[in-house]
Image (cartoon, rainbow, N blue to C red):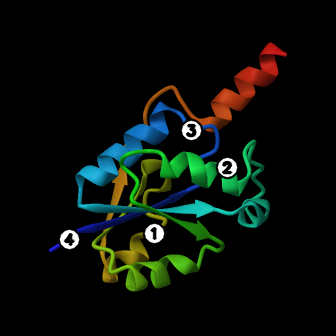
């Protein structure tokens, strides 16, 4: 039986922390689905990506750990995605710890440790400081 894993994110300025999360998530199962925040959803979250949704999707699809990329358009879609894709494990970084515990009635929920010293925000801040 195939174990399906699901994670979500913006995945802007792909870096080693993203790759570590995707690799660890994929190691938990056979098929990794990534819900990628659309540009419109990012606006609702008060985030702005350097790369467009389309470019971020192409980049994510090139990562060997990722089997499928779906658009993330709302906070509420997670439950429906879990049911639609028969997800066994929902994975997020531990900076979200406790935020998605309600999904435990549908699948396993795992919060993975973030990679120290790296984030898209940190990269953007460092680039701003250097200019």
For disc 3, the marked residue is 14
Q: What is the C-alpha distance between the residues marked 3 and 4?
A: 27 Å
Kindly state the secondary structure of the residue where label 4 is placed: loop
Would you name the residue on which mark 1 appears?
A: 100
Is any atom of residue 55 visible in this view? yes
In the figure, 115 relative to 47: above or below?
above
- Which label sits in the foreground, 4 or 1? 4
Alpha carbon distance from label 1 to label 2: 27 Å
Q: Secondary structure at mark 2?
A: helix
For image coordinates 51% across by 25% down, the residue present is 117
Q: Identify residue for label 4.
A: 2
Give the mark toward the camera: 2 or 3: 2
Instruction: Give how far across and how far down residue 108 sits, in percent.
Output: 28, 70
Characterize the local packing of mark 2: few (<14), some (14-19) or many (20 or more) Cα atoms within 10 angstroms.
few
Classify 79 as above or below 130: below
Q: Which mark is residue 18?
A: none
| Residue 55, numbered label | 2
Label 1 packing within 10 angstroms: few (<14), some (14-19), many (20+) = some
């Amino acid at each position: 039986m195939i174990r399906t894993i699901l994670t979500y994110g913006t995945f802007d300025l792909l870096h080693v922390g993203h790759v570590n999360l995707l690799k660890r998530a994929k190691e938990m199962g056979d098929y990794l689905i990534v819900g990628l925040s659309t540009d419109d959803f990012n606006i609702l979250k008060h985030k702005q990506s350097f790369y467009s949704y389309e470019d971020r999707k192409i980049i994510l699809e090139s990562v060997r750990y990722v089997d499928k990329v779906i658009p993330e358009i709302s906070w509420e879609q997670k439950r429906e995605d879990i049911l639609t894709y028969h997800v066994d494990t929902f994975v997020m970084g531990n900076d979200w710890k406790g935020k998605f515990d309600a999904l435990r009635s549908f699948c396993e929920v795992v919060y993975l440790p973030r990679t120290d010293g790296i984030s898209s925000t940190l990269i953007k801040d460092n680039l701003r400081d250097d200019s």
